[in-house]
Amino acid sequence: MLLQPASALRPLNKGFLVTQTHHRALAAIAKGDTADALVYLRKDAGGAQDWAALDAAAATAAALGDHQLALELSSRAVKAAPRETKALYNYATALWANGQLTAAAAEYGRILSITPDDHEAWLHRTQIVQATPSSNHIDALRVLASRAPSWRPEVSYRYALFKELDDLARHDEAFEELNRAARLKRRHTLYSIEQDVETMDAIARAFSKHWAMRPMPASAPAEAPIFIVGLPRSGTTLIERVLASHPDVAGLGELNTLTTEVMRAAKALSIAPKDRAGLVWAAANEIDHAALGRRYLEQVRPLAGQKLRFTDKLPLNFLYVGLIRRALPEARIILVSRGRLDTCFSMYRTLFRDAYPFSYDMAECGLYYQAYRKLMGHWLHVFGNKIHEVRYEDLVADFEPQVRHLLHYCGLEWDANCLAFERNPQPCATASAAQVRRPLYSEGIGSWQRYARHLEPLAMALGNS
């Protein structure tokens, strides 16, 4: 995601050399051994001296979710090569993930002083800095967008324009730039909304109420990880920050581990699935669910350190609720929901790098949301109170009681630190990285209304008049 620092880092160029320990880390990643990879990278922190090797290790650490290590490594890379924009970019992004927003904005500005047309630096700085009538870059961004050498820079410039125009409440102009950017991005994205809808329907059929009545695997792990699921921009990051402010909980961010292990288990079958429908059926009926749970914990538990509990907040884990219940029977599953128009417009206005391709077309976004809610209704019907649903609007309106309910569901003792999530110094690498550094606010509720006259295709797809 372009607004997700972990995956927005600029990767290693093929010509750069990396250290032997970094090579071992990459080999561990290829085998799915995240914990081992981080061990090697921490060794790299003590040995590497070349800026390119340090920068490569920093990018890998961030992609694995260790943003503090990424900051340490990228800081050393910048000291070794203070005018290398690749190193500066990854350093700025590490600062952002670690909550040092002012410093991150300054580093993005430093990049632009060296390469004034760096479209990613423009976009990221715009997300941090509030535009004002006396201090904005609208004219410069319009010139850059009109002269962009290819579609990718143009998309970035126009999303940046949208953000600054939105800051200035110039909503019609802002939406024009957003719409042009989203359409351009969608035009260059290979995607089928029909395939995603069919997949969600297939999941509901395979993981039926009758399926859920089967006995739990006797050897399934007893540990209780906390999964936070929903759509992006619905409040999942806020819920994680609340829980990760508890002294017993490690917030591990958006982990791809479950998806990786499901695919690994499916490929290991004697007859590997050949399409999505086959994968769904195999996931429900053929893979060893207890082994899946054990393998997941082997990869993730070391990342939590000494904390008793941990969160995994990859939004798209909503597809795996049935598998989670079978592989990790004691897991807590928190479904975060938000008003449909707020959710969908928040996705539409966000430039993700490669994820959520449905979000660049309003009609497709609405159709995806409808299919998502249908699947969520299915999970709630099948598993009932095993899933705890939190409405973002209720959380904002009645914060402490909602947090108390949340902690009780997770089996955690009350801790007042959870009410001061904005003080949590832990890194955050999602599109909400800046928002969660602020106290709870209500401005995001109903924010779609400022653009209501432009959102008819979305409203129609959602079934709104």
Image: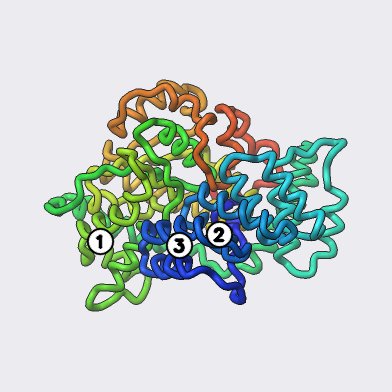
Q: Secondary structure at mark 2?
A: helix
Q: Closer to the camera: disc 3 or disc 2? A: 2
Q: What is the distance, in whole Å, between disc 1 and disc 3 at their CAs?
A: 18 Å
Kindly identify which numbered label has been placed on residue 284. Answer: 1
- SS for tag 1? helix
Q: Earlier in the sequence, mark 2 or mark 1?
A: 2
Q: How is the image coloured?
A: rainbow
- In the rendering, at what x and y percent does residue 123 appear? 71, 52
The numbered mark, 3 or 2, whose residue comes first in the sequence reads: 2
Which residue: 42% across, 41% down? Answer: 251
**Which residue has dot 3 on it?**
196
The part of the image, by quadrant, that contains residue 90 is bottom right
Q: Which residue is mark 2?
A: 59
Q: How far apart are the two marked residues, 3 and 2, measured between alpha carbons?
A: 31 Å
Screen quadrant of the C terminus: top right
Identify the image quadrant of the N terminus: bottom right
Label 3 Cα neighbours within 10 Å, binned few <14 / some 14-19 / many ≥20? some
**Residue at disc 3, secondary structure:** helix
Task: Find the distance from the CA under tag 2 to the CA under tag 1.
Answer: 35 Å
* Residue shown at the point (60%, 34%) measured from the top left: 444
Amino acid type indicated by mark 2? Ala
